[in-house]
Image (spheres, coloured by chain):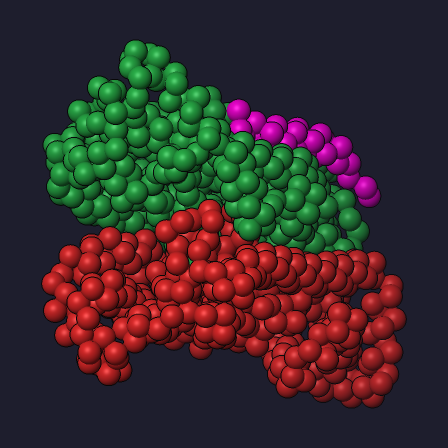
């Protein structure tokens, strides 16, 4: 094996064309990793500045009515995960700005993609793009070229006569180019570790390790398949055509088709339908702003009984605050139902895409890569759910202050002091835990491993035909 | 060998090569699927618009009937007085819709990233949350829409590569290239004839792919024929440009493997690497602003305007809206009525300010666009693609125009409302109806 590896190295190092391509790829990877990190840093700074700016507005709003402050609301900016520089995933197309206010759960707005004309159809020049599409193409040509050369020059017969093992030779070549692929991968991850100023925590390290394993598995698949077709098919053109077709179908064709099919099989509502359904369900609940609402009576009776008074005016608290929170809690159930359905449909779409990746391990790799980088749809949903949890706490604090802060029912002029607003906690987002991540990405891992095992046996089945 | 003979031989070669056959089939399937995608997206948008329109027309008719019967009060909202221009305009429920072009079936472009219907009020802006894009799976959006334009710009060159790569390369591998020359043909002309034969076949496929669905979906009759002509011409020029590039690479006589590698490399560089690098550069130079300026304008600037002295706001507004000085209340002051109409002055001032802010935001976007557009000479695939999207009204500029129109319409409403309030106008059913046409809805 060592001899085969050394021999391959000699062949590659003597071929200026391959060397040029290899060095170009390595440089491109290093540069794209560096630029990805720079962009992540710059975005993180902008997010921090924007968050501080908005927080300052909140802190300096002065004394205000808590419910007025709930309408004034605040904004959150989606943080950029440290591995966004590696794989941007959905981050370029989802919004970054979320308005938090009373009575409403809002979506993220102002995506980067909506702020300019289109500049690319395959994403930014991030390491993920190079490692998923360009490095495999390079490996296809390299493996194909070396296997065909052995066949067409008839050197393979000589090697077999001299006691060489055909499978061993092919496996050696596969391992050499697989190692070359992992070197490219290593360069990218190394730049990521060296250039990223945020300390490498165990979670990120584990994610990077899993990325390494996932990409390595894919490179083994691509090298093995190329070697198999290169070694088994009589015509060079046919063998090359198959691998080119595989690359095009896997990388360009299927990801778009399956995504579209998923949306056709599991249809999402239109925004107007979605809003109309929520509005309808919402109208069945308490309207906190409408004192004439019949549904208020039951709540009023229960509060009056609790405080043993005859009218809301006699209450030692502000009944309006309680009403607002009741309104909010009913709204939360409505949002849970509708946004829950929405996320469920998206999850089904994701499962469909993952299942349809069985014939396309590249799609599994793409899904795994986005998941581990914290930039897939599930990470975005997780972020949105945590933002919504925060919004509910945030609004509840304001409503509680309105109810129990010292004002009386009907006193809309009452104001909480600035200190109260300043004391409200900021939102901080923690990425999904490793357990959650494994739960979401295991189908991708299983498909990749299945392919690795399949390819291993495929190579085992190679027989030299004289 | 004549060109007709070359055509015949290429056809025979094609029929005997299952992988080429399969490649064409896949391309056609992808194209047909992408066209059906475009058609269904357009139909879905039209259905949504029809629903939105019927809903708002129904809502509007409720208020129209109140005014027709001589009433001005709305039972469910006792504070509403429809005879007041503010409430009259508010309840005239005016929308601005962006009807999709029939060419969307060929070019979805950026259509899925933007909203296409918006209710107009005095407070409307082109960046409101209800103008968000339709709900869709972000992973699918990140992979990009599959439309005919994508198939033509990215898949067609790959198809041409698959069809052309054996040309010359095979002859080089089996050392038959000198035989071609001995037989009297100029080698380069022989290559050009063979690639042209394939180009001709591909052109026919593409023309059919554009024409057939356009005829059946009725798009031909609904959009000016020039658009289809431009679309088709650009695609044909693009196709033959690739035939030229492929012929040039084949002429280098590299052998089958290196030739294929070279062809695919050119595609990778122009289809992935350069566009990806340009996008990366644009993001670094002009990162997502998260529209903090707009948020500030909505919260801080508006607050400041509403808190400002009326005199100062009046002075500022009369420069921008001189007709306000000729209004009834301005010329014959009535303190009670002026007090009630002051709100409209603040609203109009805010609308002018928001217009200014939106212009600044769009200017910021334009800087990013300029950066991307200046790359078209070395990033031609995206330049051509964006041109095709502009023909279909599905590019960034089509939606920018829509946003600007929304902002202008909001300003128009505020100006009109302000002048009417200051003229102490009362809204009757005819005036109410006139609000429907105040801004063009489509």
The image shows residue A357, relative to residue B199, as above or below, that is above
| Quadrant including the N terminus of chain B | bottom right
- Residue A445 horizontal/vertical position (percent): 57, 30
Task: Determine the colour of chain B.
Answer: red
Residue at figure coordinates x 19%, y 42% from the top left:
A58
The reply to whether residue A212 is in sight is no
The vertical placement of B126 against A49, above or below, is below
Determine which quarter of the picture holds residue B204: bottom right
> Hey, which quadrant is residue A178 in on the image?
top right
For the record, the magenta segment spans: A439-466
Residue that appears at 65% across and 50% down: A260
Chain A drawing hue: green
Residue B37 locus on image (x, y percent): 68, 58
Q: Horizontal placement of B310 versus A393: left or right? A: left
Asked whether the viewer can see residue A326, the reply is yes
The answer to whether residue B12 is left or right of residue A90 is: right
Magenta stretch: dominant secondary structure: helix
| Residue at the spot 45% in from the left edge and 39% down from the top edge | A380
B85, A338: nearer the viewer = B85
């Amino acid at each position: 094996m060592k001899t085969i590896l050394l021999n391959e190295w000699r062949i590659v190092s003597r071929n200026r064309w391959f060397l040029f391509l290899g060095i170009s790829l390595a440089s491109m990877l290093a540069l794209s990793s560096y630029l990805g990190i720079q962009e992540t840093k710059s975005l993180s700074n902008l997010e921090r500045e924007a968050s501080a700016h908005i927080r300052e507005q909140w802190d300096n709003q002065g004394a205000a009515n808590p419910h007025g402050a709930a309408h004034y609301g605040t904004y959150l900016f989606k943080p950029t995960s440290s591995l966004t520089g590696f794989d941007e995933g959905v981050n370029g197309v989802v919004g970054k700005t979320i308005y938090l206010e009373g009575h409403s759960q809002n979506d993220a707005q102002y995506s980067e993609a909506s702020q300019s004309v289109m500049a690319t159809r395959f994403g930014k020049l991030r390491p993920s793009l190079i490692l998923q599409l360009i490095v495999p193409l390079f490996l296809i040509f390299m493996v194909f070229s070396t296997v065909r050369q052995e066949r067409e020059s008839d050197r393979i017969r000589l090697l077999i006569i001299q006691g060489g093992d055909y499978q061993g030779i092919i496996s050696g070549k596969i391992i050499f180019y697989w190692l070359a692929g992992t070197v490219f991968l290593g360069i990218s991850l190394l730049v990521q570790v060296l250039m990223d100023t945020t300390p490498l925590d165990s979670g990120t390290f584990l994610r990077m390790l899993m990325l390494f394993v996932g990409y390595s598995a894919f490179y083994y698949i691509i090298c093995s398949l190329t070697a198999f077709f290169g070694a088994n098919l009589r015509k060079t053109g046919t063998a090359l055509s198959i691998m080119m077709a595989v690359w095009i179908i896997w990388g360009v064709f299927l990801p778009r088709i399956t995504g579209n099919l998923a949306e056709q099989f599991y249809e999402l509502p239109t925004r107007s339908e979605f809003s109309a359904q929520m509005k309808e369900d919402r109208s069945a609940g308490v309207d906190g702003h409408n004192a004439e609402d019949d549904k208020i009576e039951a709540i009023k009776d229960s509060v009056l009984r609790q405080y043993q008074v005859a009218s809301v005016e006699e209450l030692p608290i502000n009944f309006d605050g309680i009403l607002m929170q009741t309104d909010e809690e009913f709204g939360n159930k409505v949002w849970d139902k509708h946004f829950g359905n929405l996320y469920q449909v998206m999850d089904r779409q994701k499962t469909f895409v993952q299942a349809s990746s069985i014939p396309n391990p590249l799609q599994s790799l793409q899904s795994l890569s986005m998941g581990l980088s914290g930039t897939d749809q599930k990470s975005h949903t997780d972020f949105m759910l945590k933002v919504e949890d925060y919004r509910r706490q945030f609004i509840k604090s304001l409503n509680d202050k309105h109810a129990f802060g010292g004002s009386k029912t009907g006193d809309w002029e009452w104001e909480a002091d600035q200190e109260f607003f300043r004391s409200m906690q900021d939102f901080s987002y923690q990425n999904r835990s490793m357990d959650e991540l494994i739960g979401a990405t295991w189908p991708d891992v299983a498909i990749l491993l299945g392919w690795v095992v399949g390819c291993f046996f495929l190579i085992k089945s190679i027989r030299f035909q004289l | 060998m004549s060109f007709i003979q070359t055509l015949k031989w290429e056809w025979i070669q094609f029929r005997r090569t299952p992988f080429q056959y399969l490649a064409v089939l896949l391309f056609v399937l992808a194209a047909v699927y992408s066209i059906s995608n475009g058609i269904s997206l357009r139909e879905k948008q039209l259905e949504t618009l029809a629903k939105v329109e019927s809903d708002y027309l129904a809502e509007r008719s409720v208020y129209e009937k109140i005014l027709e019967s001589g009433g001005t009060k709305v039972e469910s909202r006792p504070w509403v007085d429809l005879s007041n221009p503010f409430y009259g305009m508010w309840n005239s429920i005016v929308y601005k819709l962006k009807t999709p072009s029939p060419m969307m079936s060929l070019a979805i472009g950026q259509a899925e990233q933007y909203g296409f219907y918006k209710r107009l009020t005095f407070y409307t802006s082109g960046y409101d949350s209800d103008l968000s894009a339709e709900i869709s799976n972000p992973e699918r959006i990140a992979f990009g829409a599959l439309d005919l334009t994508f198939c033509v710009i990215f898949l067609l060159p790959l198809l041409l590569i698959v069809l052309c790569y054996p040309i010359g390369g095979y002859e080089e591998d089996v050392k038959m290239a000198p035989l071609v020359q001995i037989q009297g043909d100029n080698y380069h002309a022989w290559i050009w004839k063979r690639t042209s034969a394939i180009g001709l076949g591909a052109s026919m496929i593409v023309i059919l792919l554009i024409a057939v669905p356009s005829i059946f979906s009725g798009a031909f009759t609904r959009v000016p024929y020039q658009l289809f002509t431009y679309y088709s011409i650009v695609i044909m020029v693009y196709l033959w440009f690739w035939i030229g590039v492929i012929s040039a690479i084949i002429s280098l006589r590299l052998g089958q493997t290196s030739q294929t590698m070279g062809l695919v490399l050119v595609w990778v560089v122009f289809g992935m690497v350069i566009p990806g690098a340009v996008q990366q550069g644009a993001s670094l130079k002009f990162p997502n602003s998260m529209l903090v300026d707009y948020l500030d304008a909505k919260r801080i600037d508006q607050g400041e305007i509403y808190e400002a002295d009326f005199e100062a706001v009046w002075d500022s507004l009369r420069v921008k809206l001189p007709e306000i000085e000729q209004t009834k209340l301005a010329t014959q002051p009535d303190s009670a009525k002026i007090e009630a109409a002051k709100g409209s002055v603040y609203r109009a001032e805010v609308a002018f300010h928001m217009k200014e802010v939106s212009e600044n935001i769009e200017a910021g976007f334009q800087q990013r666009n300029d950066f991307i557009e200046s790359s078209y000479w070395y990033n031609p695939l995206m330049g051509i693609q964006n041109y095709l999207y502009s023909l279909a009204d599905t590019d960034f500029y089509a939606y920018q125009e829509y946003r600007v129109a929304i902002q202008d319409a909001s300003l128009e409403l505020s100006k009109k409302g302000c002048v009417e309030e200051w003229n102490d106008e009362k809204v009757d059913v005819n005036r109410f109806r006139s609000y429907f046409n105040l801004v063009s809805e489509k």
